[in-house]
Image (cartoon, coloured by chain):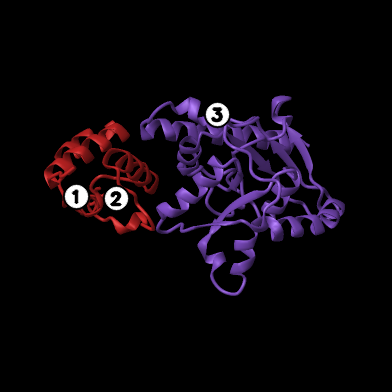
Amino acid sequence: MSSKGKKAPLFAGRYFFYDFTKLTAALPGLVFFRPKVLYASEAAKKKIKGGALLIANHTAVYDPIYLQIAVWYRRHHFVCLKEFFEGKGGWFFKSFLCIPIDRENFNISSFREITEHLKSGELVSMFPEGRINDETEGVAAFKSGMVLMAMRSGVPIVPVYVRRWEGFPRRLTMAVGEAMDVAALCGGRPAMSRIDEISALLHEKENELRELAEKR
Amino acid sequence: MQLTREEIVEELRSILLSADDKNADLVETCSEDSVLSTDLGLSSVAMLYMVIAIEETFDVRFDDVGMDDFKTLGDVVTFIEDHVR
């Protein structure tokens, strides 16, 4: 499960806060919050190498923590609302490698920042439902911008399903799917209808992962 | 490269047609006054698609520009006219 892009550096000053927080939170995280991780196939078990876009459903604010535990061996650049960067807590999100995005007036700079991270071999994680969804009506439709991002960067998309946590001491269940090579599916400059089709296909995969996770 | 506004509109029509040929009639008849979201029915992702295609076609770069900064096709034409290298 790897793209042809470069590898992210093992050590760099800009990662210090992220790596330090992750290391210190690792033990309590694994003791109290270790999720059950299921895989859609043998291929889905392969470690994610190189640039990749990780997408997941969004049922609660703690989803980013679980994603980081499930794919513990990579640094995640989370795409999150620009409002989180405003005010006193903004430094945390900046230091934690998050990428601000304006949901009301999408800025091309955010798109460029995401694709640059992907092209340089990093992992970007996002929630294409675009909001926290209580799942009363299942996984909400995905916004197709993610397909454009992966296509422009030449990286695969990895779908992950996070089941709603039923509370302590029950462990949360997650399901990881196979990486989808979006650039190969798109080819050249595809029409918007093709991009929407691929987005719908990823939504279908997400629902399959949902079934897998809900069985347990 | 010095393009007239009409030539830029023509290029934009061909970009919009390659993006989505379902609205071919709307695109063929659009003018600089056409509102991107309502008259041409462009979603934010379609706008992003158009921006990428414009960057490739006209060799311009959109920096720190929000999708809502362009209301009409004329706004896009003006941006290209001002930034074309």
Marked residue chain, label 3: A
Marked residue chain, label 2: B
Label for residue B34? 1
> In which image quadrant can residue A56 be found?
top right
Q: Nearer the viewer, residue A168 or A81?
A: A81
Locate residue B13, reporting x and y percent.
21, 38
Q: Residues within 10 Å of mark 1 (few under 14, many from 20)?
A: some
Label for residue B37? 2
Q: Secondary structure at mark 3?
A: loop
Q: Residue at x 27, y 36 (%)?
A: B15
Q: Residues within 10 Å of mark 2 (few under 14, many from 20)?
A: some
Q: Amino acid at mark 1?
A: Ser
Identify whether A92 is placed above or below A146. below
Left or right: A203 in relation to A61: left
Q: Secondary structure at mark 2?
A: loop
Locate residue B80, reporting x and y percent.
24, 50
Residue on which the image places disc 3:
A181
Q: Quadrant of the N terminus of chain B?
A: top left
Q: Amino acid at mark 2?
A: Ser
Q: Residues within 10 Å of mark 3 (few under 14, many from 20)?
A: some
Locate residue A170, reporting x and y percent.
83, 50
The letter of the red chain is B
The letter of the purple chain is A
Please tell me if label 3 and label 2 are on a single chain: no
> In which image quadrant can residue A175 be found?
top right
> In which image quadrant can residue A99 be found?
bottom right
